[in-house]
Image (tube, rainbow, N blue to C red):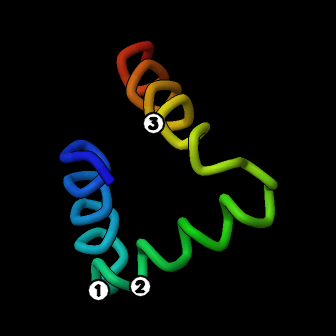
Amino acid sequence: MNSYSKKLSKQIAELLFLSEKTVKGHRTRIIEKLGIPKEKNALLIWAIQNYKKSL
């Protein structure tokens, strides 16, 4: 997990009053259910970063 993911996990956890570990666990399960291979996680993070920039 890169530093951007860690920062995002922390922000989500604070916003939802959850632990960072809970957020990471949910993210992992969502990625698994979507069938996204681990090597595609970097692409997913890139997409999130660029979506935020377009807002």
- Quadrant of the frame with the C terminus: top left
Where 25 sits versus 43, above or below? below
State yes or no: discs 2 and 1 in contact (Cβ < 8 Å). Answer: yes
Q: Indicate the position of residue 44 as horizontal and vertical percent values.
A: 55, 36
Is 16 in front, or is 40?
40
Q: Indicate the position of residue 31 as horizontal and vertical percent values.
A: 66, 58
Amino acid type for the residue under numbered disc 1? Ser
Secondary structure state at the residue bearing disc 1: loop
Secondary structure state at the residue bearing disc 3: helix
User: In this figure, which residue is indicated by the disc labeled 2?
Assistant: 22
User: In this figure, which residue is indicated by the disc labeled 1?
Assistant: 19
User: In this figure, which residue is indicated by the disc labeled 3?
Assistant: 45
Amino acid type for the residue under numbered disc 3? Ile
Residue located 55% across and 75% down the image: 26
CA–CA distance in space, label 2 to label 3: 18 Å
Q: Nearer the viewer, mark 3 or mark 1?
A: 3
Residue located 59% across and 50% down the image: 38
Q: Indicate the position of residue 8 as horizontal and vertical percent values.
A: 29, 52
